Image: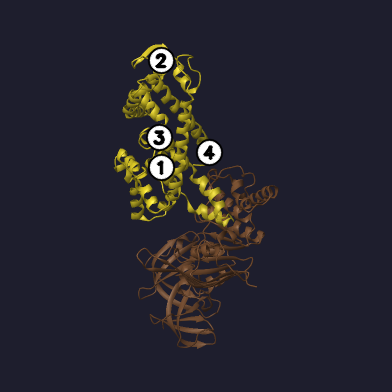
């Protein structure tokens, strides 16, 4: 039995100028029970719209959203077994923390004794035991965030929808909350659908990520797969940094392909999905480009170029390398303590090596 | 002397200068007359107007029930008129609220130019003379006026209804002139109502009625209370509307005061009436402010 299923959902908005914006353009998505699914995409890509449609704040124009085989069409938000954690937290300013958390229990008529017990438990779960009598405005952003979580979790929803809940927190706090949220999801065993535009956040927390852009799901896969095998150029660029070179397969030897790039270089890649004559995009992650051959006997590909800029970021040295015809490749060179002597100045000629296994190929569009 | 002292002193001096005109105006044109009224209300009315400088608490006695026997008589009519004024003022508050609350939501959801137009329309009546506006209601409500003519020609009534010179007509007039005063505070509050609160309430399982009662109403309460106070006070002491639309049948305390001062030339009695109204308003407002202060201390703004 499918759990939460979105099938060919469409939704369009009218702009004030009279145009149409397709917020959801044929979105199909199967959310599995008990998973941490992240909707990742740039702002305005439709991910929040999708969340609102699941929550019941907005209706889809066509298509279907169903939960355990039951269509949710016409089911108002307050009758859906989902709860939302809002980006702004949306705590009720006129109620105490305990009454905020107990709100959902109060309106659904849960008996006083059980209500109080569950409120206590929920506050304990998010580490705010004893905060019940305080007011929302007396709490820090992170604490308000936890109250918002407790307020939803106390109702034991089947699915918890989280709309960029960490975006208002500072970096340190955000990283802590990422771990906590993931652990929380694990311990309460509730499906989380998490919306974010932050790819690091998505990679760190999710069981699966749906990359959304232009109202479409670009790729739905586990974080490692999204990173290692992006389905298209958009995903390759949006998740992590990518060096992308267009080219054509000119030779094939088993799984080892030789690709001729636009600037007449021959490079190697392994793939069994492409053959001679295919037009491809070669995706290389910056950390896979090395300044020296590995020397372990595996045939390596080599690109030469000139350093345009080098930026030291602490753990890495980021090099911007001109590889000809105005193309710039980005290289993340691991920094070791005491490496100071080998500073790489702009203008230095370098050779970039990579193992063909590290290269990912995607089908070139429009050829 | 440190420099921070001088800055503080300078700040205090400029504050005093800034507040001076207001303070002078308030004391000369409000506190002093108020004091005079207070004194007069305890003096004996002169035979031909003016006052005799004798201690005379019976002005109040006439109104609330311990008259100087065989000279001034206790007239329950004054209390009745006061209670009627109170009733009319409360009905006015309710009437303006019923009109303004939904309208405020409606206007707050409008976009740009449309919203500004709506706000302009609400303040538009202020541009016309008050007397003209009230007189217009006289023409609408009288036996041969618009409403009766329409109802009669539609065959719904045979005899014209007694619309004019009733509590009803006075309340209509009051609601009409005081609506903007109720609307603006409510609108200011509704405008900044965070709709994510409403969403959160729905999301947590509250049906529309529960959401309204538990979230929307408490969050807009400050505007409702503010509007009610601003409408209640002028409604309670109003004398223009009842003198036009109430005729001789509907008397409000405002008319009584006007008559005491201008026609019977019984200034002490008029002063006593005015102070009683003021006292009841002050009690009400202080009660409200202290409640609001408590609510704010609890974290509601």
In the image as oriented, which residue stretches furthest toward the top? B54
| Disc 3: which residue | B234
Q: Residues within 10 Å of mark 3 (few under 14, many from 20)?
A: some
Query: Left or right of A200: which side holds A157?
Result: right
In the image, residue B148 sits, relative to residue A2, either above or below, namely above
Q: Mark 4 or mark 2, which is nearer the start of the sequence?
A: 2
Chain B's colour is yellow
User: Secondary structure beneath disc 1?
Assistant: loop
Marks 3,1: beta carbons within 8 A:
no
| Chain letter, colour brown in render | A
**Closest to the observer: B217 or A307?**
B217
User: Secondary structure beneath disc 3?
Assistant: helix
| Disc 4: which residue | B295
Q: Chain of mark 1?
A: B
Q: Residue at x 35, y 55 (%)?
A: B114
Colouring scheme applied when the structure was drawn: by chain
| Disc 2: which residue | B43
């Amino acid at each position: 039995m499918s759990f939460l299923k979105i099938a060919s959902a469409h939704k369009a908005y009218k702009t004030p100028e009279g145009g149409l914006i397709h917020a959801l353009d044929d979105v199909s998505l199967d959310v599995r029970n008990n998973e941490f699914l992240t909707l990742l995409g740039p702002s305005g890509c439709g991910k929040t719209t999708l969340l609102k449609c699941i929550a019941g704040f907005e209706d889809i124009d066509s298509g279907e959203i169903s939960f355990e085989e039951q269509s949710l069409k016409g089911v108002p938000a307050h009758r859906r077994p989902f709860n939302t954690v809002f980006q702004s937290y949306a705590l009720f300013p006129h109620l105490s923390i305990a009454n905020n958390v107990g709100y959902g229990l109060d309106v659904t008529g849960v008996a006083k004794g059980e209500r109080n017990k569950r409120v206590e438990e929920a506050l304990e779960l998010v580490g705010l035991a004893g905060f019940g009598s305080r007011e929302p405005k007396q709490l820090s952003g992170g604490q308000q965030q936890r109250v918002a979580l407790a307020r939803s979790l106390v109702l034991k929803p089947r699915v918890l929808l989280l709309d960029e809940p960490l975006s208002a927190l500072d970096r340190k706090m955000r990283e802590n909350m990422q771990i906590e949220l993931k652990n929380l999801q694990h311990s309460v065993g509730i499906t989380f659908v998490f919306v974010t535009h932050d790819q690091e956040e998505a990679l760190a927390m999710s069981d699966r990520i749906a990359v959304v852009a232009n109202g479409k799901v670009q790729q739905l896969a586990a974080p490692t797969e999204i990173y290692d095998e992006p389905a298209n150029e958009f995903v390759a660029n949006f998740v992590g940094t990518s060096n992308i070179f267009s080219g054509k397969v000119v030779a094939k030897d088993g799984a080892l392909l030789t690709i001729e790039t636009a600037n007449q270089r021959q490079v190697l890649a392994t793939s069994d999905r492409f053959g001679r004559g295919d037009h491809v995009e070669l995706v290389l992650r910056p950390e896979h480009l090395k300044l020296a051959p590995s020397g372990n006997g595996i045939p390596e590909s080599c690109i030469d170029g000139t350093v345009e800029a080098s930026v030291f970021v602490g753990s890495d040295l980021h090099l911007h390398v001109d590889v000809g015809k105005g193309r710039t490749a980005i290289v993340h060179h691991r920094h070791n303590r005491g490496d100071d002597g080998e500073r790489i100045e702009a203008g230095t000629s370098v050779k970039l090596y990579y193992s063909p296994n590290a290269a990912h190929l995607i089908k070139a569009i429009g050829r | 002397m440190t420099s921070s002292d001088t800055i503080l002193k300078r700040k205090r001096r400029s504050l005093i200068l800034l507040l001076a005109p207001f303070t002078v105006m308030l004391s000369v044109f409000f506190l002093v007359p108020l004091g005079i009224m207070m004194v007069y209300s305890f003096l004996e009315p002169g035979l031909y107007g003016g006052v005799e400088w004798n201690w005379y608490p019976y002005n109040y006695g006439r109104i609330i029930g311990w008259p100087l026997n065989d000279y001034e008589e206790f007239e329950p009519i004054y209390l009745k008129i006061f209670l009627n004024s109170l009733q009319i003022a409360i009905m006015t508050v309710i009437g303006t609220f019923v009109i303004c609350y939904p309208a405020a939501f409606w206007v707050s959801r409008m976009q740009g130019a449309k919203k500004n137009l709506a706000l302009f329309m609400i303040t538009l009546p202020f541009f016309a003379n008050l007397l003209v506006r009230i007189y217009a209601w006289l023409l609408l409500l009288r036996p041969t006026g618009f409403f009766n003519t329409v109802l009669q020609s539609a065959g719904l009534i045979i005899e014209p209804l007694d619309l004019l010179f009733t509590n009803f007509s006075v309340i209509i007039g009051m609601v009409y002139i005081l609506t903007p005063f109720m609307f603006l505070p409510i609108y200011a509050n509704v405008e900044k109502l965070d709709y994510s609160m409403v969403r959160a309430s729905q999301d947590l399982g509250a049906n529309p009625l529960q959401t309204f009662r538990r979230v929307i109403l408490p969050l807009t309460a400050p505007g409702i209370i503010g509007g009610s106070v601003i409408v209640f006070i002028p409604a309670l002491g109003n004398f223009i509307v009842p003198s036009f639309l109430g005729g001789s049948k509907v008397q409000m305390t405002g008319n009584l005061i006007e008559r005491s001062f201008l026609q019977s030339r019984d200034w002490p009695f008029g002063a006593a009436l005015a102070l009683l109204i003021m006292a009841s308003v002050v009690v009400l407002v202080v009660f409200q402010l202290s409640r609001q202060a408590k609510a704010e201390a609890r974290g509601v703004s």
